[in-house]
Amino acid sequence: MSILGLKKKQPKTFKVKVITMDAEMEFSCEVKWKGKDLFDLVCRTVGLRETWFFGLRYTVKDTYAWLKPEKRVLDQEVPKDSPITFHFLAKFFPEKVEEELVQEITQHLFFLQVKKQILDEEIFCSPEASVLLASYAVQAKYGDYDPNFHKPGFLAQDELLPKRVLMQYQMTADMWEEKITAWYAEHRGIARDEAEMEYLKIAQDLEMYGVSYFAITQNKRDTDLLLGVDAQGLHIYSPNSKLNPNKSFPWSGIRNISYSEKEVNFTIKPLDKKKDVFKFYSSQLRVNKLILQLCIGNHDLFMRRRKVDSIEVQQMKAQAKEEKARKKMERQILAREKQMREEAERAKEEMERRLFQLQDEARLANEALLRSEETADLLAEKAQIAEEEAKLLAHKAAEAEQERQRLEVTAMKTKEEKRLMEQKMREAEQLAVKLVEQSERRLKEADHLKQDLTEAKDAERRAKQKLLEITKTTYPLIAAYSPPPAPPAPPPEAPDFAYESASTRLDFKDSDMKRLSMEIERERLEYMEKSKHLQDQLKELKTEIESLKLEEQQQQAGLYNLRSEARGYVQEPVYIPHSNRNSAYMSQMAYFEEV
């Protein structure tokens, strides 16, 4: 009995799984727990204090419902599964997110929910706004853009744009990523909570933001209207248009909203009594209850916003303000530390680079030092060799100087000899000229003598001819009248005289001719000997001049080589022509050879 009693006293529990926008949690709940108990447990676990925006939603058949806080959990139409699944979501939306959302966790949960609704196309968003919102979502997730870290393709696994936008344009994923990255790079320095708040500030201006849609009819037969409930009021839409309402009833202009379970209709009474009362119908009881809950909750928040904040909210806002200031200061400190760390890293990299550079320079300097030492040794050897060569060159220079002086003396002697040779050449030339003149004179005399000889020979020939003629005419008469042969008597004086004169004349002519011929021959021989002797002298003089020229050239080349050696280098001997100096000698020698 005691054991059974103990078993009955043990409380029964049931499993619950709560899914938030970024986590899943499981709880063990007591059977007697009301919806408020479970909701408070989830809020404490999440760390949420702005609880009036949120609720626990569950699925019922083909629609959804919100867990009521005042009823027990198991007494509501929750699923009978184990664990029972609830979704922790925003049930009501603020009018101005920047003013109403205080806690960072509240902003984060709203950001995640609105982002999912946009990607699931529950909230219509233009392509341009989608790209901008995606850039803020990337900033909230990845922080500041770093081209060295965020390489192309780093967004390939992230869902950032609605499928409708992706299908609307013929663009590749890389092109979309490039557009998003261009905006993302401009958000540098924005913290995560700030990026999420910027996202919500843009999203709250979208037409479908925070609106819950329900199918209604204005009478029981028509089903062609949509009811939208949001923080601003109630809106009536056409079934094919959720952007522009046909009629709106702001909370400030509604006097009363009533629901009749008997007639299953809603009645909206405006503050202005002149305006007509608007009635509409909904076919499902659960939907009617849901509409009524949303209307009551949004209207309560609307009225709450127009009142002074409660002490709890004021404390939350003050704490949030302090927290933001503290986080801002922390971010600034962190930014400074990050900047200092980056500067330190850059300085470290620069120092490492400088260290490597100095090491390379040191290595190169060591190598250069080794090379310089080797070069110094080599230069020392070369210096020693150069010193020895300098001594040798100095010795050679002294010898060259002596040789130069000797050559200068020799050159002076050569010049003297040359002058004497030139004098001899001039004398020889004068002698040759005299000999030529004598030769011409003798030739002329010889020509005269030859002419005289020719004339003498002609006279002799004529005399002999005449004598023969006289002999032929006188010899027969003498033979006839003369006695027998006897010694010839001397001729008469006159004839004999004439005869003797003629004979003497003839004899004289013959002797002169012989003598003259002998003299001419002798003179010719003497001339030939003198001419031969003169030619020999000219040849000897030419040979001496050539030898002197060659010796002078050798002396000049030797002197030039000695000077070059004295300067530290030796060049090939340079032949200096003396054509100008020796042209007169050559012409004279040619002239003498001709003579």
Image: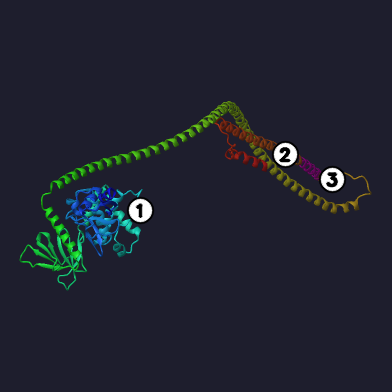
Q: Quadrant of the C terminus?
A: top right
What label sits on residue 532 in the rendered view? Answer: 2
Q: Determine the secondary structure under disc 2.
A: helix
Q: Amino acid at mark 1?
A: Phe
Give the residue displayed 62% in from the left and 34% down from the top: 554
Front residue (pair 328, 347): 328
Q: Residue tagged by mark 3? A: 492
Front residue (pair 156, 340): 156
- Whichever of callouts 1 and 2 sits on the residue coming sooner in the sequence is 1
Q: Residue tagged by mark 1? A: 154
Residue that extends furthest to the front in the rendered view of this protein = 1
Kindly check if marks 1 and 2 are in contact, taking CB atoms under 8 A apart as contact.
no
Q: Amino acid at mark 3?
A: Pro
- Whichever of callouts 3 and 2 sits on the residue coming sooner in the sequence is 3
Q: Is label 3 or label 2 in front?
A: 2
Q: Determine the secondary structure under disc 1.
A: loop
Q: Position of residue 99 (x, y in %)?
A: 17, 51
Q: Main secondary structure of the magenta part?
A: helix
Q: Does the magenta portion include 516?
A: yes
Q: How many marks?
A: 3
